[in-house]
Amino acid sequence: MLPRLSEEHEIFRHSVAEFVEREVKPNAHQWEHDGEVPRALFEKLGKLGFLGVRLSEEYGGSGLDFWYTTILLQELMKCGSVGVPVAIMTHAEFATKIIDRMGSDDLKKRFVLPATKGEMIGSLGVTEPGAGSDVASLRTKAVRDGDDYIINGAKVFITNGTISNFITTAVRTGGEGYRGISIIVVPSDSKGLTRRRLLKTATHASDTAELTFEDVRVPAENLLGEENKGFRYIMQGFEGERLVLSIIACCQMRLMFETAREWGHDRKAFGQSLLGFQVWQHRLADVLTNITAAEALTYSGIDQYVRGEPANAEISMAKLFATEMARHVAHECAQIHGGMALMEESLMARLYRDIMGFTIGAGTSETMRGIIAKSSGLME
Ligand SMILES: Cc1cc2nc3c(=O)[nH]c(=O)nc-3n(C[C@H](O)[C@H](O)[C@H](O)COP(=O)(O)OP(=O)(O)OC[C@H]3O[C@@H](n4cnc5c(N)ncnc54)[C@H](O)[C@@H]3O)c2cc1C
């Protein structure tokens, strides 16, 4: 169960819920069709302060705790399109938060301030064609040339890649391995940067791109923090990103459960509703139990994270359990829909396919198991 939060949290939930009902829900289906969320949505969210909940007050944010991000996500997820919260979280939590945390005053003025207002959209460029889970092997190279860096290489699977104004980019500035990685903020209109939209089978409202850097010249002051310390900055950001994925998985499971319950109530077979059969009462009872367990683990991870306690293993457990459980729950909830589960007109079809990326993004299930094994002394 969600822990008891403050009155301020509840007021915030109320205003997000109202916004989602008015501005997001009626349009989510169209954005799924268009393959991206409109820039106007970011601007509206920015005006209401929803993009800067965890960003510094000095740069337009509110400096609030992660429970506010949780609430924002829970309400956004009610629109039924995972792509919408993914686009917003990638912008605010993944691409901008790291600049807010590590960037110079100048970088924060140039990127965090407009990102908070929704005037600029951000993406995070870490994954490459040859380096996914193994972040330390990335090869996109940045070479210092006077007051600039010159960047050459490629990134793939970059969320918001074609709509973003800046890419918080992981590059190699030093030798092999994790010690040679830095983060540079690359403006999307930089000469030599090309972006190609990739077509996905799921989360259609979130745009995903391949980026190519050919002699892209970026001012040296766009470096985040210290040179060759970027790997650590990325890893620190992963805790928040994994919690985001855990929350999304929990919300998606709730949506699937409610959809299945409604269908089971309305659909008749052999003279009674499907929920008249004990087999479906029990299968959905199991589903609800599993969702509640995933939420408990996720809330416990958030609680530790908000308290500032070391939570890497717990957050990895939450991400692993919630995202893997979403696959099982999707199967159960789709099964009660029979053939309708495959039809585009059915919400269940979209809910089912949208869970595919949960066990992959922000660290795969195998990576999560590796972290848990290491932190539990299981590795020989
Ligand atoms: C929809 C979507 C959006 C994304 N958005 C972004 C984004 O905005 N920015 C960004 O930088 N990246 C993004 N990614 C990329 C994502 O982070 C990577 O897909 C992920 O890290 C896995 O990398 P990979 O796909 O290259 O798989 P690989 O690393 O090649 O892994 C393939 C398989 O091998 C397994 N594997 C790898 N290493 C081991 C090991 N040591 N032991 C056992 N098994 C292993 C993996 O778990 C996986 O099952 C996105 C991905 C998706 C699907």
Image (tube, helix red, strand yellow):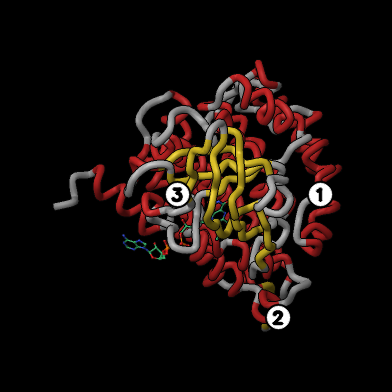
* Marks 2 and 1 close (CB-CB < 8 Å): no
Provide residue 97's location: percent of width, then percent of height: 57, 32
Q: Position of residue 336 (x, y in %)?
A: 61, 73
Q: Is residue 35 above or below residue 70?
A: below
- For badge 3, the amino acid type reads Lys
- Which residue lies most toward the bottom here? 270
Relative image position of residue 254 (x, y in whole percent): 60, 53
Would residue 58 be seen by someone viewing this image from the given angle?
yes
Label of residue 271 in the image:
2
Quarter holding residue 350: bottom right
Q: Which amino acid type is shown beneath numbered disc 1?
A: Pro
* Label disc, if present, on residue 131 of the rendered structure: none
**Residue matched to label 1:** 38
Q: Residue at x 57, y 61 (%)?
A: 355
93 sits to left or right of 28: left
- Of the numbered discs 3 and 1, the one sitting upstream in the chain is 1
Q: Earlier in the sequence, mark 2 or mark 1?
A: 1
Q: Which residue in the rendered view is the most extreme toward the left?
A: 380
Q: Residue type at mark 2?
A: Gly
Q: Position of residue 53 (x, y in %)?
A: 65, 27
Q: Are marks 3 and 1 in contact (CB under 8 Å)?
A: no
Q: CA distance from mark 3 to mark 1?
A: 29 Å
34 sits left or right of 158 in the view: right
Q: Which residue is mark 3?
A: 319
